[in-house]
Image (tube, helix red, strand yellow):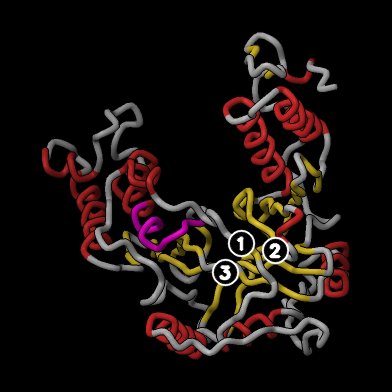
Amino acid sequence: MSNEGAGPVEWPVVVRVPVEPVEAAMEADAVDAAARHSGVAVRGPLFGVAAQSEDDGRRWKVAVEVTHGCPQQARDALNSRFWFRAKDEAKDRAERRALLAAVARLESECVDELTVLDTRYRVVRAEEYAAVDAHGDIETPRPTDPEPLNPDWSRGAGTRSPRVDDGLVLDPDAPLSPLQAAERLTLRSLTYSGARYPGPVLEDSARALESHPDVMLMPAAFLIVERSGTEPWSPGSSLHATAHDARRTLAFALTWMEPRTRGLIPYDAERDVDAHTVVAENTSPAVAELAEFAAAADRLRAGRCNEIEVGSTVSRIARARRLLRWGPDGPEGPRPSDINTQAPQALHPRLDEDGTVHFDDPAQDEDPS
């Protein structure tokens, strides 16, 4: 990737110096982090959906979290939201009909923008990246990143955790702190470069600088990254809203998933059987290996631990960033060179205008008109 050159002067940035103690601490923390991690490692694009109503001005609201690996996954997520909204929330047949018409389009077309009930929806494209130091090590959570006062490590806690991008408003005119403004201005000219990228990818990236000359920085998210020996870091999880959510996912992987994957615990064992319970019973020939996994999970639970090593694998909680390119008409959508891993399809049973679900009648047979 390349980020040389100045950003366009026609896109001003409003800077507000933090004065509140919490904001000032976060800014100081960000300055320290920038000094330690001055490089950028780009993972690639992520996709979601943003929505805009008539009274939103230049603001957009995230309707589908910007965490999906291809545009079609974001379209499918929007498809499901419209379907469940029609089933559970529609006030009358006219509203349900409008929602079902959108579902029908999303089942058969690679549509990147549509208007439903006076709200404009757009599939949006973000670039995921992370800050790295001079040795290529990825930044971990900062002291001022949000953490729960009473960490919940139970397996069901994930259903009660905040969702990535929940309620997020994308406002290009919102004031920024000095460091946020500097990062935004620096990343305006970020583009793909190098021989490892196909020609169409490079061309689309260069074209985006003209069509969407500004960038919007999204809140930090967190994920597990892993590496063995001198291999580069690779992602080991999806994005989480908080570092604690990523740690809890890693603890579950260490005590429940990894032992089953490695054959240390049978796949058909009871759900509550994990490395801790087997070690406590001391009845398995794999107790020594399982004890190592259990001990690593215990280290995570003991405090804000962001890195553990089991065997030859190091797992780290990484701090990920995302940027949306922004143009006169709002956030950038998918590029022609972006790849879809699946085709549009019916995801749910047919729902009629009265709200009745027809389980034995395929959705694609419905005439939404």
> Residue 51: horizontal and vertical position, in percent?
70, 52
Q: Is residue 26 left or right of residue 108?
A: left
| Amino acid at the residue labelled 2 | Arg
Alpha carbon distance from label 1 to label 2: 7 Å
Q: State the residue position of label 3.
A: 321
- Packing grade of label 1 (10 A; few <14, some 14-19, many >=20) is some
Horizontal placement of 257 versus 186: left or right?
left
Q: Are marks 3 and 1 in contact (CB under 8 Å)?
A: no
What's drawn in magenta, residue-wise?
Answer: 239-248
Name the residue: 11% across, 38% down. 281
| In-front residue for pair 202/210 | 210
Q: Quadrant of the N terminus?
A: bottom right
Q: Indicate the position of residue 358 as horizontal and vertical percent values.
A: 65, 12
Q: Amino acid at mark 3?
A: Arg
Cα separation between marks 3 and 1:
16 Å
Query: Circle 1 is placed at which residue position?
Result: 169
Q: Is residue 356 above or below residue 330?
A: above
- Where residue 143 sits, quadrant-wise, is bottom left
Residue annotated with mark 2 = 59
Amino acid tagged 1: Val
At mark 3, the secondary structure is strand
Mark closest to the chain's N terminus, 3 or 1: 1
> For this rendering, which residue is in front, 142 or 96?
96
Locate residue 244, reporting x and y percent.
36, 60
